[in-house]
Image: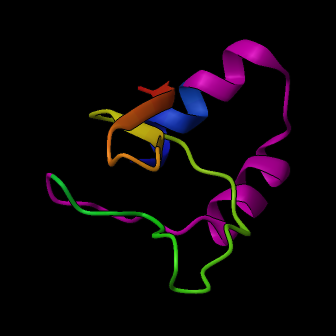
Amino acid sequence: MFEEFEAYIGAEAQFTKDELQLMRSLAIEKKLRRRQYVLQEGRGEVCRHKMFVAKGLLRTYQLKEDGTEVIMRFCA
């Protein structure tokens, strides 16, 4: 999956092979199932990483007091 990220970032900026290798060594690939959460409210989780969506769609949403969802952001 790093190839998709490398192609994306290569179109935005120029990096040396050493810099790309460093990014690859620090990257963690994580596959999620449908309806699986990256982070959940109330569990004390804090996002400390940057994410790159190679395939699929992620959404950030907030629950209103009446239980309805307000979508704040889509990531594809």
Name the residue nearer the viewer: 24 or 48: 48
- Residue 38 position within the rendered picture, expressed as x and y whole percent measured from the top left: 42, 63
Q: Residue at x 45, y 70 (%)?
A: 40
Tell whether position 20 is magenta. yes
Q: Residue at x 48, y 68 (%)?
A: 39
- Residue 29 position within the rendered picture, expressed as x and y whole percent measured from the top left: 43, 64
Work out whether 12 lies above or below 37.
above
Q: Is residue 51 left or right of residue 35?
A: right
Residue extending furthest toward the top: 11
Q: Is residue 54 visible?
A: no
Residue extending furthest toward the bottom: 44
Q: Residue at x 51, y 70 (%)?
A: 41
Q: Is residue 74 left or right of residue 50?
A: left
Q: Quadrant of the C terminus?
A: top left
Q: Is residue 17 left or right of residue 36?
A: right
Name the residue nearer the viewer: 34 or 15: 34
- Magenta highlight range: 8-34
